[in-house]
Amino acid sequence: MMLGACSAPADVEQFIADAQSQAEAIDDDLQRIEQQVTGIPADLRADVTNAMASAQAATDEARDALARAEQSEDGAVVALEDAQVALEAASAEVKHVTDEARQNGADKVADLLSTLQEQIDALRGETESAAA
């Protein structure tokens, strides 16, 4: 996508709005997970906390890139592509920790992490659409 000095086209604006909604859903998921981690073993809790931090950082990066795209700023496409990479890495980490949580019998946390991973993947798709 070539983002110029004028405002973003309507379809891009919709992708941006959808992605921003997706980022809010990730924030909600992170809060739900945070409420559940206190009852799990310390090692697993550390892994979950690290995965949550990665998800938050990637989401923040996506938000910044989306703001740049919404304003049609220079470098917005590169920022969106970088956000996609960060979201992909966060998704992989969350998936790994989800599997670890399941193996440790922390099914409620695993279910929440699985939902988080789906939200991250959806946000990645929205940032990809906004950058295309």
Image (tube, grey):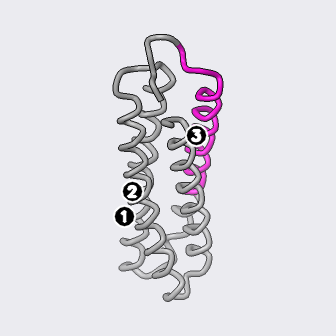
* Amino acid type indicated by mark 2: Ala
Q: Earlier in the sequence, mark 2 or mark 3?
A: 3
Give the foreground label among 1 and 3.
3
* Amino acid type indicated by mark 3: Ala
Q: Residue at left 40%, top 20%?
A: 73
Report the side of 77 relative to 28 (left or right): left
The dot on residue 1 is none
Q: Position of residue 22 (x, y in %)?
A: 60, 45
Name the residue carrying label 1. 50
Q: Callout 1: few (<14), some (14-19), or many (20+) C-alpha neighbours within 10 Å?
A: some
Give the foreground label among 2 and 3.
3
Q: Position of residue 30 (x, y in %)?
A: 53, 56
Disc 3 is placed on an element classified as helix
> Which range of residues does the magenta coloring cover?
7-31
Q: Position of residue 82 (x, y in %)?
A: 36, 44
Give the spatial CA distance, label 2 vs label 3. Answer: 19 Å
Residue 71, above or below 81: above
Circles 2 and 1, Cβ within 8 Å, touching? The answer is yes
Disc 1 is placed on an element classified as helix
Q: Position of residue 128 (x, y in %)?
A: 51, 43
Q: Earlier in the sequence, mark 1 or mark 3?
A: 3
Name the residue carrying label 2. 53
* Amino acid type indicated by mark 1: Asn
Report the side of 117 relative to 42 (left or right): right
Q: Residue at left 51%, top 49%?
A: 124
Report the side of 53 relative to 31 (left or right): left
Name the residue carrying label 3. 19
